[in-house]
Amino acid sequence: MPPGTDPARASLPPGPRGSVWNTLWFLRDPYGFFAAQTRRYGDPCTLPTHGGKLVITGDPELVRAIFSADPATLEPFSVEVLAPFLGERSIIMTGGERHRRDRKLLTPPFHGARMRAYGQTIVDVTRAQTRSWGVGWRGAVQPTTAAISLDVILGAVFGIETPAARERWSDAIRRYVGASSPLIIFMPGLRRDLFGFGPWARFTRAREELSGMVLREIASRRARGAPGEDILSLIMAARYDDGGSMTEEEIRDQLFTLLAAGHETTATSLAWALYWIHRDPALLRDLRDELRGLGPDPAPDAVAALPLLDATCAETLRLHPIVTDVARRLRAPLALGRWTLPAGAGVSVVTALLHGDPRLYPRPEVFDARRFLGARPSPHEYTPFGGGARRCLGAAFALYEMKLVLATLLSDLELELLDRDVRPSRQNVTMGPKGGVRMRVKERRG
Ligand code: HEM
């Protein structure tokens, strides 16, 4: 037994009682809710949730203790609610040995040279989706960043190439995403068929349609026997240590997961990045200078290595962690500061608290990309992609995509903000910019 984890001494830190008010507060303003609870009860503190007691923290030392705990002692917390959306076999749903072996199989397609093969796709998709943005265009940018990230997933993950096929898949995915309303995600009691007319019935139909398309695509690729460079092909060809491979249903659930985890998150982060870059003329000018230094049509890898662009993406994800907190359920007691948390309790790293800590980030409420130039915070001080054995599988991919999309837009277009004071608001499961960041395209100034 690790030191300090005697089950007989297990106890939970104090915290508020459950109330409808707290649930609504959390849904509307998770940043403010978490900050108020730790101010009142201390850090860590315990929140009552539908999934049981959840101990939250934004203290870097406690975050280190959680992310460095033996992965065998941690499992997903209260994710059952997501099963209809991701599939029972999704990597997000599993724990223990099953998670370890699936993750090992899914990791290689997201690494190094493999991922870079998608660089040109990202640039091409960005140009295609903004082709209609002539001088005078005005509107919210988030629907377009969403269309870009969807096309990138279709190309890189599903290997869908032709415009007609892309259109067909985008439509099916939009129907599926559009039918996944927060109400049926957060209130399982509303999952009733209602003679085929309610939101649940609509969602079930959209899921079945997409599931059928994915299964048919897998079967036709197996029949053709012509593997491509896309992530689906790589997963189909991958083998577990014992020589076995994923079943078609398992692959389908992982694809649904990559879609759910990679689409809205990247699109929202891009919209925030565009907002902050255009609020700060000096940053915009320096980013353009940095890009110009690479000459015309730079190689995607050279763009991804630009320090100020990298720092701008890092600061965007610091100030706006799209996923506000990541939780685990304890399979064994865990020593957390002066507490010993009992097995069965939940424990959560609140990225929104950690990223707002003035000891780590002076004037944390200010967007300052330059704070990320040079020294980098450690993995327990900066957690936009979570951490430990469940850290976001697509983190490198997401950052690569963000940098290439931003570089393409900043090089091709002269944009201006129409809204100066954009606030975060809930958008399905994540928090995004209210109004989607409205901008307009101006005449280029040389
Ligand atoms: C800016 C964009 C993104 C953000 C902010 C983000 C954030 C996160 C976070 C916070 C987690 C939970 C980590 C944890 O529990 O410790 C996660 C998990 C995951 N993400 Fe991302 N993500 C992004 C983009 C992507 C992309 C593009 C993909 C793939 C196409 C992806 C695939 C995944 C997967 C598969 C998991 C589950 C990992 C596991 O449970 O082992 N994400 N992501």
Image: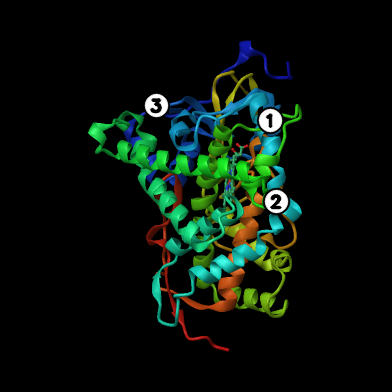
363 vs 296: above or below: above
* Left or right relative to 209: residue 104: right
Circle nearer the viewer, 2 or 1: 1
Of the two numbered discs 2 and 3 on the same chain, state the one appearing first in sequence: 3
**Residue 252 image position (x, y, % from top left):** 54, 38
Dot 2 crowding, Cα within 10 Å, few <14, some 14–19, many 20+: few
- Residue underneath mark 2: 377
Identify residue type, mark 1.
Arg
- Residue underneath mark 3: 17
46 vs 418: above or below: above
* Left or right relative to 197: residue 329: right
* Res. 376 in view: yes
**Residue 254 image position (x, y, % from top left):** 57, 39
Q: Determine the image quadrant of residue 170.
A: bottom left
Of the two numbered discs 2 and 1 on the same chain, state the one appearing first in sequence: 1
**Residue 266 image position (x, y, % from top left):** 54, 55
Circle nearer the viewer, 3 or 1: 1
* Cβ–Cβ under 8 Å for marks 3 and 1: no
Seen from the viewer's position, the closer of residues 353 and 49 is 49
Q: CA distance from mark 3 to mark 1?
A: 36 Å
Say which quadrant the C terminus sits in.
bottom right
Seen from the viewer's position, the closer of residues 340 and 201 is 201
Say which quadrant the N terminus sits in.
top right
Q: CA distance from mark 2 to mark 3?
A: 34 Å
Q: Residue at x 42, y 27 (%)?
A: 50
Q: Which element is circle 3 on?
A: loop
Circle nearer the viewer, 2 or 3: 2
- Residue underneath mark 1: 100
* Cβ–Cβ under 8 Å for marks 2 and 1: no
383 vs 364: above or below: above
Q: Residue at x 68, y 30 (%)?
A: 100
Identify residue type, mark 3.
Arg
